[in-house]
Image (cartoon, rainbow, N blue to C red):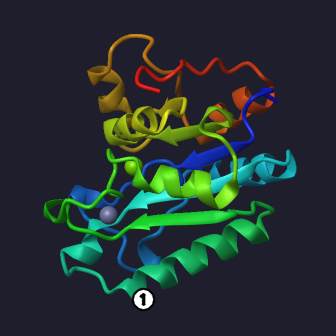
Amino acid sequence: MHARIRHVVLDRDGVLNAEPRDGGYVTDWSQWQWLPGALESLAMLSSSGLCISVATNQSCVGRGLLARDRLDAVHARMLEEAARAGGIINHLFVCPHAPASGCGCRKPAPGLLRDAVEATGIAPCETIVLGDDLRDLQAASAAGMPAALVRTGKGASTEASIIENEVPVFDDIHEFTIALLSDSIAPVRPRNP
Ligand SMILES: [Mg+2]
Ligand SMILES: [Zn+2]
């Protein structure tokens, strides 16, 4: 395992589960679709002793499209299915705010990642953010954390838009997990630590 990394902060949509169609939202567990290898990856990360957080923008709540308790119910199922597969998601951080609210937690703002540092006591330099969206990478940079990109979800188009070699890129969370646990990942230092 990478000597420095003790904590993985995962984006949700496009990393763990399939992006909802047409820019929509997962409003019910029936719409949840684990991406291939996601459950196995959570189990691998857990059994290797890594702390796992999920940090997700869910503006559907702030937009009035989904009640908070229904979002919480989706997350309860997510945690339960992951745990049954052997993957313990230790912390969950949600920004429920609409973009116009100007909150400090909606990625690319670093609020959720700062909460993750506070909750775990694990330093930003020992933490890695995995996302599919440019906003995930920007939030990591603002929080002083290394980051990696997956090609699932929005990741393929994000990859096309970022500067070459800015972050390591993996086909999916499973490829990322194998690289992280075999110490073959080389997180690029954030530009604005
Ligand atoms: Mg995403
Ligand atoms: Zn927020």
Q: Residue at x 49, y 57 (%)?
A: 55
Spot the residue most to the top. 164
Spot the residue most to the left. 100
- Residue 149 in percent (x, y) is at 48, 32
Q: Residue at x 79, y 32 (%)?
A: 181
SS for callout 1: helix
Q: Residue at x 52, y 58 (%)?
A: 115
- Residue 139 in percent (x, y) is at 39, 41
Can see residue 69? yes
If the image is split into quadrants, where does the N terminus sit?
top right
Q: How many numbered marks does the figure carry?
A: 1
- For mark 1, does the 10 Å Cα neighbourhood hold few (<14), some (14 to 19), or many (20 or more) residues? few
User: Ligand 2 within 8 A of label 1's CB?
Assistant: no
**Residue marked by disc 1:** 69
Q: Residue at x 43, y 16 (%)?
A: 166
Question: Eyeballing the image, is 5 above or below 27?
Answer: above
- Residue 44 in percent (x, y) is at 79, 47
Quadrant in the rendering for residue 83 = bottom right
Question: Eyeballing the image, is 189 above or below 114?
Answer: above
Question: Eyeballing the image, is 22 above or below 139?
Answer: below
Of residues 164 and 110, the one drawn nearer to the viewer in this rendering: 110
Of residues 50 and 30, the one drawn nearer to the viewer in this rendering: 50
Can see residue 17? no
Quadrant in the rendering for residue 87 = bottom right
- Residue 171 in percent (x, y) is at 53, 30
Amino acid carrying mark 1 in the image? Asp
